[in-house]
Image: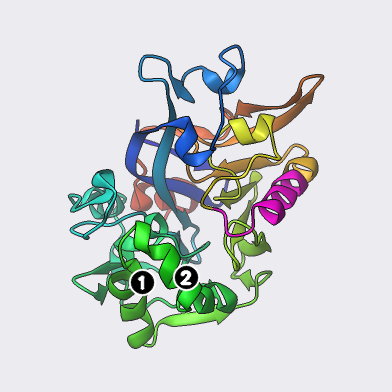
Amino acid sequence: MAHWFDLGDVAVVPLIEDDRLLIEPGEFFPGLEPDLAGWYAQEPWFDRAAGKLVFAIQSFVVCSTDEVLVVDACVGAGKDRRRAEFDQLPDRWMRQFLATGLRPAEVDAVVFTHLHTDHVGAATVQREPVFPDAPHFVVEEEFRYWSSEAGGAAMRRTGDYLTDSVLPIEQAGQLSFVAPDAVLGKHAELVPAAGHTPGNVCVRVRGSAGTVLLAGDTMHHGVQIRHPELSTRYCVDPEEAARVRSRILEEAGDSVLLPTHFPAPSAGRVRRGRGGYGFVFASDLLRAGPFRYGEWREQRWGS
């Protein structure tokens, strides 16, 4: 479904490359036997017929009158990838970006929460940066890890996305290293969240009508809200990833979390109950229908 999130003077717009990627529970969480009575084993989180977890592949555009920020860049089109669902995709991501009325030259900055294949691919086409005037921010430790022998070994399961999707940005002089708690403009700041990867971050977006934490891959599925101790097989440091996740849930309060891979509408509030944490989708911030940047500016500022 087409939708976006209304923070008053800021809009957060999902660019959804795949709204229903089905994954065997044991692939991400070895040994997991989902509790079919649990909320995370119901739709939209779980496909009962297939017996698989439901994931989204998406990234986000953060829009204000002052700046346009892209957070992550999905798998991307026409890339050679070992996972069949990621290999040689059509360019759905860029079509969605252009449908907002924005153009690549209008993007002020790109943020990579981390450098996994499903977060960087659409930032280049034929090994050229898509956003020609934008710095691409990443934590230096993240880049150094994936450029190392250990990172190279980890990429063998996916295909060498660093070469076709990250190094071209560095070679163009557009890759900029930032601190994991850097402030990015008037509305966004990074939140350190190492564990899933060595330089993993979240992005906190503040608007006049609310705050959203773009939680990236600190949690992939609702089962990790019910069981914060559960890290994926793809976490570089599973114990630290679990500590980060527990901290985020503990501190969530009434703020809105928007993890990258949660199924639509993805954004919600954490609720603590007797059986552990739950998650309630943030319908108050949700706006159905396509986002049009020009119309949005006109409605709010008349220009």
Which residue in the protein does label 1 denote? 162
Residue 201: image quadrant is: bottom right
Amino acid of disc 1: Leu
Q: Residue at position x 50%, y 49% from top?
A: 11
105, 147: nearer the viewer: 147
The label shown at residue 207 is: none
Q: Which residue is mark 2?
A: 151
The way the protein has been coloured in the rendering is rainbow
Type of amino acid under label 2: Gly
Instruction: Please check the rendered image and state whether residue 265 is part of the magenta-colored stretch, yes or no.
Output: no
Q: Residue furthest top?
A: 37
Q: Which segment did they paint magenta?
A: 235-248
Question: x and y percent of residue 284 in the render?
Answer: 59, 29
Q: Is residue 247 magenta?
A: yes
Q: Is 257 situated left or right of 275 in this image? A: left
Cα distance between the residues tagged 2 and 1: 10 Å
Say which label, 2 or 1, has the lower sequence index: 2
State the SS at label 1.
Answer: helix
In the displayed orientation, state which residue is furthest to the front: 31
- Relative to 227, residue 251 above or below: below
> Marks 2 and 1: CB-CB under 8 Å?
yes
Please state the horizontal and vertical placement of residue 58, each as a whole percent of the image: 40, 46
Seen at 59% across and 70% down, the residue is: 184
Identify the residue at image location x=38%, y=83%.
Answer: 170
Residue closest to the eye, 46 or 269: 46
Quadrant showing the N terminus? top left
